[in-house]
Every structure is written in C-alpha cells, then in structure tokens.
Amino acid sequence: MPVSPNQAVAVRDVRDEFRADLDAFEATERKLLIEERRERARVLSERFNGLTLRVSE
C-alpha cells in the first residue's frame, strides 16, 4: 500500500522526536553515572584517608 506524503512526514517527525528523546535519555544517564562514580570515589577516599601503602619483599 503506498504511503501518502502526509504519512511520510509524520513518520519522519516521529523518528526525529524518538531520536531526540533517546539522545536526551542517554545524556542524562551518562551524567548520573558520572555523579555516581564521583560519589563512590569520594566515599572510598574518605574511608582510606591516611592509609599508608607499604611495599615489602
């Protein structure tokens, strides 16, 4: 069945909107992961603050 020009435009708009939403979601997810890693690093640095590393044979 042939696709009318109006349907083709609607499909393209939906694809563009979906791609924009997906890009925004991925950007937010990356930001949250970065914040989570920073918090984990902060907690670990507090936990091991003052720890002296000694290498022995």
Image (cartoon, rainbow, N blue to C red):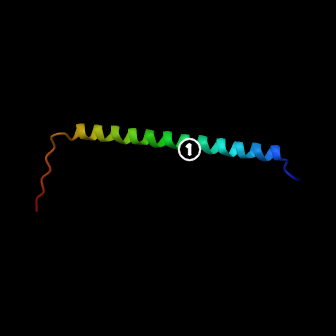
Residue at x 46%, y 43% (from the top left corner): 30
In this view, 55 is above or below 29: below
Q: Secondary structure at mark 1?
A: helix
Image-based side of 7 in relation to 27, left or right: right
Farthest residue to the bottom: give it: 57
Q: Residues within 10 Å of mark 1 (few under 14, many from 20)?
A: few
Image-based side of 22 in relation to 42, left or right: right
Image-based side of 29 in relation to 40, left or right: right
As shown in the figure, which amino acid type bears the numbered disc 1?
A: Asp
Instruction: Indicate the quadrant containing the C terminus: top left, top right, bottom left or bottom right.
Output: bottom left
Q: Nearer the viewer, residue 5 or 39?
A: 5
Percent position of residue 25, x then y: 55, 40
Image-based side of 38 in relation to 48, left or right: right
Percent position of residue 15, x then y: 68, 46
Percent position of residue 8, x then y: 78, 47
Quarter location, residue 32: top left
Q: Nearer the viewer, residue 24 or 38?
A: 24
Q: Which residue is mark 1?
A: 23
Residue at x 43%, y 42% (from the top left corner): 33
Residue at x 81%, y 43% (from the top left corner): 6
Farthest residue to the front: give it: 5
Residue at x 36%, y 42% (from the top left corner): 37
